[in-house]
Amino acid sequence: MSLGEKSIVFIGFMGVGKTTIGQLVASKLNRSFIDIDHEIEKEFQMPTTQIFKVVGEKTFREKEKSLISQLSSESKTIISVGGGAFLQEEVKEICLSNCMVIFLDISWELWKERLNTILNTRPVLQGRTLDEIKELFYKRQESYSEHHLKIQIDGLDPDSIADYIMEALHKA
């Protein structure tokens, strides 16, 4: 599959803006957009925090892997994966070999400012101290180290990020 045909997968820590930016890029490229977490929520008919409590993280991760495996082989789709998806080696390998993987990177200092707006919707943040969340943030950065394009989003608005991505894709 040519680069122009490949699906694009957005990775990065929770709350970084994968869904917002993915939707903008999908609109600009006239492609369909899929948020994996939202698809799982629709299937289980409950929010992610409830899925983790009711059926457990293991079941969630299995469904996540199944959906990503299926969707990553499709062409011209924009996919936003959850912040923990790339912790699964198989998911990482599938995305890297079948898709264009874009890592949205943010500094801890800027991300921390978003914490209050996302805290109640992210099950892996529940019951953690700020120090524990910071440790998780830096630990997860390792899982995002393999990608095709990295964008440092500090100080950029979503439209600027989407425009930058469009420019990078046209150059590629």
Image (cartoon, grey):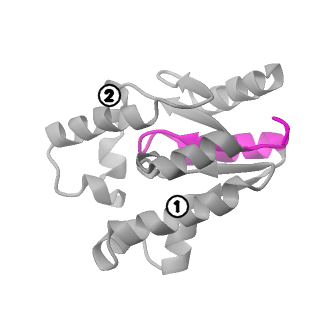
State the image coordinates of residue 131 (x, y, percent, origin top left). 15, 37
State the image coordinates of residue 148 (x, y, percent, origin top left). 63, 29
Report the amino acid beneath label 2.
Trp
Where does the C terminus fall, quadrant-wise?
top right
Q: Residue 14 versus residue 60: which sits nearer the camera?
A: 60
Region in magenta? 1-29
Does the rendering let one see residue 16?
yes
Residue found at x 23% / y 42%: 133
State the image coordinates of residue 119 (x, y, percent, origin top left). 30, 52
Question: Badge 1, how many Cα within 10 Å: few under 14, some, many 20+?
Answer: many
* Quarter of the figure with residue 98: top right
Q: Magenta stretch containing residue 13, yes or no?
A: yes
Residue found at x 46% / y 35%: 144
Q: Is residue 160 left or right of residue 132?
A: right
| Real-space Cα separation, disc 2 to disc 1, in angstroms | 27 Å
Question: Badge 2, how many Cα within 10 Å: few under 14, some, many 20+?
Answer: few
Where does the N terminus fall, quadrant-wise?
top right
Q: Which SS class for mark 2?
A: helix
Residue under numbered circle 1: 65
Residue found at x 54% / y 33%: 103
Which callout, 2 or 1, points at the residue further toward the start of the chain?
A: 1
Q: Magenta stretch containing residue 27, yes or no?
A: yes
As drawn, the label of residue 108 is 2
Report the amino acid beneath label 1.
Lys
